[in-house]
Structure formats: C-alpha cells, structure tokens
Amino acid sequence: MASAALVMLMTPGLAFFYGGMVRAKSVLNMLMMNFIALAVVGVLWALYGFSMSFGDDAFGGFVGNFHFAGLENTFGKLAGFAVAATSSSPAVAWPGSDALPVLAFVMFQLMFAIITPALISGAIADRAKFWGWTLFVVVWVTVVYFPVAHWVFSFNGFVGENAVGGWIANNLKALDFAGGTAVHINAGAAGLALAIVLGKRKGWPKDTGRPHNVPFVLLGASLLWFGWYGFNAGSALAANDLAAVAFTNTTVATAAAVLGWLIVEQLKFGKPTTLGAASGAVAGLVAITPACGFVSPLGAIAIGLVAGVLCALAISLKFKFGFDDSLDVVGVHLVGGIVGTLLIGFFGTTSVNSLGADGLFYGGGFTQLGRQAAAAGAVLAYSFVLSFIIGFVIKKAGGFRVSTEDEISGIDEAQHAESAYDFTGSSGGIGQPTTIPVKSATGNAKLEESKA
C-alpha cells in the first residue's frame, strides 16, 4: 500500500513535469488532462478494469473475465503463487505466511492503470479538448490498457489457484518487471497515433512552444523519480532482497541516463540544460522499469546510459518525420521502453532473479532477446492501431481538437474558464507592478512598490 501511494504521486508529478513544458496559457489544461485520469480510471478499475486485467483468460485469451467485476471475490483473499504443502510445512500463498492481500494488489495495479493514459497526454499538449480527451481515456483503458495489462502482468495462479493469465507472461515468457511494455511502449505508441490524428499545432515546427516554467519541469521529474521507487521496487510485491535490487537499479540507471542525455546536449548544442537533465532522468526511469528486477547494477548503469543517449537523439525524429509530439512522449517513453525491454535480452541474469533469464552477455544466447522483441512489437502494434482508430473517431465526431482560435488565444480559458496566471496585472500579474504591505525598519507598516 505504501508503494501504491508512491505510484499515485507519480501522476500529479507527471502533471507538473508536463505542465512546466507547455505554454502558460495551456498549463491548466495539461494539469487537468493528467488529473482526470485519477478519477476516470479509478472508477473503471473498480467496476471492471481489475477483472479484465487479472481475471481468468476469456475471449480466446485476449482479456480477463468478469470474476472480479465490482471488486467482488477480492475481500479476505490472498494473492501469490501457491506453494505446495510439504512434510514440514503447510501449503501457503507466496510470499509465505505474510502473504499479499488481493485488495492491496488491486490498489497497487490501479496506479499503473492511471498513469499510463496520463503519459499519452503529453503528445497532444496545447490542442486537445478536455472532454474529448476524457472520452478517449475511457475507451482507451477499456480496449487497450486492460487487455495489455492482462497479457503482461497476469501470471497463472496469482490471484487464484487455478487462475489462467496472459499470453506474454505465461506463454511467450517475455520479461517485464514493472511495465516497460504495458505502460511505456503502450503509452508511447498511443501518443504517436494521437499526434498523427490530431495534427500539428498552429505554427509548428517553426514555433515549437517554449517551456513556460522550467522549475515546474524539474519538480515534476523529481516527484516522478521519488514515486518510481514504488513503481519498480514495489513490483517485487514484498520488502525483500529483490525489492532492494530493483530500488538500487532504478537509482543508478536514472543517474546514468541524466549523464548520457547531458553529454549529448553538450556535444550537439554546447551547453547542458535543466530541461535535458529532467528529461534524461525520466528516460532512465522508463528504460530501467522492465529490467530493474532482472539485471545487475552494472547492467542497470549500461541500460540507463544507452537510454539517456538514444532518447536524447530520438526526440528529433518528430522533425524528420513531421509528427508533432508536443512533449516528446515518443522519444522518451516509446524509445525508452523499447530500449529497456530489449536490453533485458543482453543484460538479464538469473543470479539476480531466478525467475528471470540469462541474456546474451550471460550465456543465454538470443532466445530471450527474441521474446522481448516479440512482446515489444505486439504491444506497440496493438496500441498504435487501436489508439489511431479511437482518436480518429472522436476527432471526426468533432470532440477532440480545439479550434484554431482557441489554440491561439489559450485553451485554459476556452476549456476551463480560468487561467493559471493573471496576465492583466489587476492582482500582481506577470510583468506588472503590485503594491504589497511591508514592515519597515522602524516597525511602521508602509506600502512598497515591487515588481512581480
């Protein structure tokens, strides 16, 4: 539950990370696009989302059944791989006598389901209608996230002795410790699809839109890094050695990615930037997510460094191919997720996790790399196609893209009838003088002029 709370904080952290990068006149819309995911997905998860994700295989293994609809059959239940009885000990649910309550697992996985659609929002910043986006979230988590979560996260026997889980986890046996495929490749592919469907912002690429508040960006990245320990270490589902390994790998990979991104900036532009440091940290967090419980710390450093370099280079792809991915969801989450997922096939080692696999560098050959590539490709293709269709239908119905006038004047006012800042100066707006009471040296209150 503590890890679930940490992951919950990631969504407001993401809102600040994205919100600082957009224009001042659309920051509230960006914050709301993230925050609404907490409300929408929270309700859907309880109604049917957890059941679709972790119920028994249904519809040919495509998704889970409705055994847990309304969170029925979860009270007083324990989750875990069943441990057979022996002559010296009774049968228990993993991880032993202190087994995990199903409802604790329900809440932990809910936070993954919430942040995944929120990640997509950065690809269409500055131009999306709020209720159109909300409708997209409802449909997308239902037909894309819940089935993919079932494929990747639902292991046979975990939420019931005879429970049958998803094909990527149990048949393909691709490894994804905390969501490189189900969260980041899934969201990155959807972001690419929506960026294409909604089209370019007015004036892009000549006017790319400068970040209005870089301190917000760094604050958001820091909150993400903090919450990510729940995301990755919490996926061990116990306070044990594996959780400590995941925590350590998350730290060193992220640190290496920051360095990798800043080195690229120094070589390309002659200066390292704060925005680059924040983006590098997120790229490292993304890449180590699928691998954190399967690689050594040295492997984690290598993965982070590769991700920092490749994601820094990948953000320029949108200019080459002409899709307006506003906040580099494709360059960071899609590319970073692919990097981390594939590199398990090189750096994975059973010395860290006996339930993992040895990668190419540990004598395992190309077998695991092939499994990782198949999982990444399947999730990418499924998410892209379905996201494109959903976004296209909502756009054609007139419910997704704001008007040119609203985009130019500011979608905060148009969509929410409010703005983050007072631009008029009537109450100390940006660039305007304001009068505030200040205590003088003699103890008398007087009015002093100061610049906002």
Image: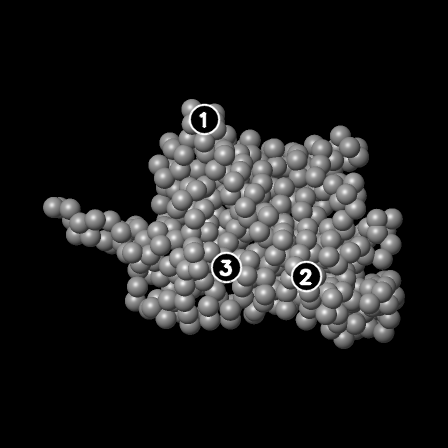
- Where does the image place residue 80, in percent across and percent down from the top left? 32, 53
- Where does the image place residue 254, in percent across and percent down from the top left? 57, 40
Query: Mark 3 — residue?
Result: 146
Query: Which residue is depicted at the point 46% across and 56% down?
Result: 62
Identified by mark 1, the residue type is Gly
Identified by mark 3, the residue type is Phe
Q: Is residue 291 above or below residue 62?
A: above
| Mark 2 Cα-neighbour bin, 10 Å: few <14, some 14–19, many ≥20 | many
Between 321 and 76, the one lying in front of the other is 321
Q: Is residue 141 above or below residue 206?
A: below
Residue 391 disc label: 2
Secondary structure of the residue carrying tag 2 is: helix
Q: Is residue 250 left or right of residue 395?
A: left
Of the two numbered discs 2 and 3 on the same chain, state the one appearing first in sequence.
3
Q: Is residue 263 above or below residue 275?
A: above
Identified by mark 2, the residue type is Gly
Query: Which residue is depicted at the point 36% across and 45% down?
Result: 240
Between 363 and 143, the one lying in front of the other is 143
Query: Mark 1 — residue?
Result: 365
Residue lying furthest front: 60
Secondary structure of the residue carrying tag 3 is: helix
